[in-house]
Amino acid sequence: MEGPHAEIVAPLGLAAVAAAARAHGHDVELVDLNLATDPFPALAAALGRSDPQVVGIGLRNIDPLANRRHSFLPAFGALLEVVRRGLPSVPLVVGGAGFSMFPRAIMERYPAVDVGVFLEGEATFPEVLAGLERSARPSGAAKHLRADVAHLAGTPGTIVRVREARPTDVTGSADCAAHTGPIADASGSIADAADSAVDRGTRLIEGPARPWLPEVALDAVRTWLPELAASYAGRTSYAPAAGVETKRGCPLGCSYCVYPALQGRRLRYRSPETIVAEVEALHRETGAEWVHFNDPVLNYPAGHFREVCGRLVDRGLPVRWTGFFREDVLTPADAKLAVKAGCAAFQFSGDGTCDRTLARLRKGLTLGDVLGAARAAAGTEALSVYHFMANVPGTDSEVVAGAHELVDRLHDIHNPRENLGAIVFNNLRVYPGTPLAEELVASGTLEPEDHLLFPTYHDPAPYQHLRYELEERHHLHASRRTGARYPTEEASC
């Protein structure tokens, strides 16, 4: 996370992978560095305490978004160094959503990583562990076997770094893979087996994509582990620490979004019974009173969403929740059902501020849809939070005027109940493989060879200050609702 005061949330993906490894009979120690004041000593201490045979690192985010130019990769690289310095011969596996957006670029940049697990890791990581375990048995070799990952090459859902010995290797170098102590190189000096004078080249072998997990497997995924339950109790001020998925996948085609690539375009549903049981367990085991539903879009399609809400109403849990809603399917009746089921805040990511920008972002929405959803949500006691993109491709003076008008209209809609939580404006973060990236390359705005690993935003002149102007307009509206009364000049005299 970015700084010690950030609102931390439980690492859902890391917990799911850890639980899957445990289900396959492996001993797992989960180390959540979001909870550490100083992560590097915390990781070093955990490695020394557990003396692991494999180290896995989950990289959820590459950067914090929200227009910030901060990158998490420098700290990630330092974490890899901590592992390599303490356990130079242990296989190091990296996965997570952040990694899955840039698997080859990250593997190329960080040679310390032996195996990359891309996309869903619940099935892939246990298979990697089983492969490493099988390779260790025949030789009866030492516990740590960093170099022996080549046999994993081609495993679905992985990129494997194969270290290839050159013909000039010292005699017996073929056995170095199983050796964890110091060895003598050709000149008689002492070197660690992982960094010996044997000069190894490397190549990356990418396996095919693994089929998406079926729905029955999603129902079996456990993500809230006991140690996380204890660690996150009372840790956050406003962000729900606990996340729950109701489904995976996104069939929408927004031009800038990576969710379809990370979760697939086909929707895969968890059963409403499983979802409600997980929410209930979170409340019972951790005291959680506030949950975030992590779906890319929570209420699409409406049928599954209504069924989940109905089960929550029937169960009567004292748990509030939030999630991102699709505007064109949110009816006033559904908004009221959501609030009855515990929704305390509607999150909207319309992103486009007028019909032109909505079309340019391929949202499949109209401005009428955005305003209709606002009216539906405003008719309840829940808060509404709106997210929009400023200075998208094609922005001109007409778009700017429309964006300012939209701020006014949203405040007008929510003023009667004063339930407008916030209007958030950001710029577009450009990700590889998206239609937006292709558009920017074609226009010459983006270099084709740019790996986009570090924060890259579309925010060209002359409207690079638009988001601040829109934020100012929003805050001016909010200030007028304070009810402040100032003395007139005559009274003050």
Image (cartoon, helix red, strand yellow):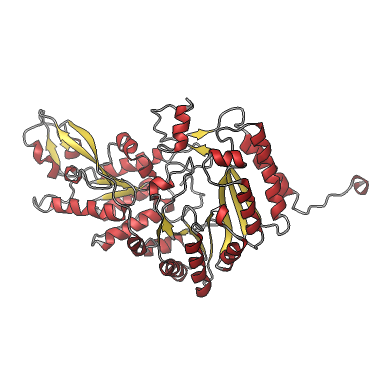
Q: Residue at x 16, y 39 (%)?
A: 193
Which residue occupies the foreground of this view, 123 or 264?
A: 264
Query: In the picture provided, is 129 more to the left or to the right than 295?
Result: left
Which residue occupies the foreground of this view, 387 or 148?
A: 387
Viewer can see residue 53:
no
Residue 452 x %, y %: 42, 34
Which residue occupies the foreground of this view, 41 or 264?
A: 264
Query: In the picture provided, is 448 more to the left or to the right than 372?
Result: left
Q: Residue at x 11, y 54 (%)?
A: 137
Q: Residue at x 49, y 71 (%)?
A: 311
Q: Residue at x 31, y 40 (%)?
A: 81
Residue 192 x %, y %: 18, 38
Viewer can see residue 15:
yes
The mark tally for this picture is 0
Residue 357 x %, y %: 58, 39
Q: Is residue 203 above or below residue 224?
A: above
Which residue occupies the foreground of this view, 38 or 451?
A: 451
Query: In the picture provided, is 250 more to the left or to the right than 352?
Result: left
**Residue projecting furthest to the left:** 171
**Residue projecting furthest to the top:** 444
Residue 31 x %, y %: 35, 54
Q: Is residue 115 above or below residue 303?
A: above
Dividing the picture into quarters, in which one does residue 399 lie? top right
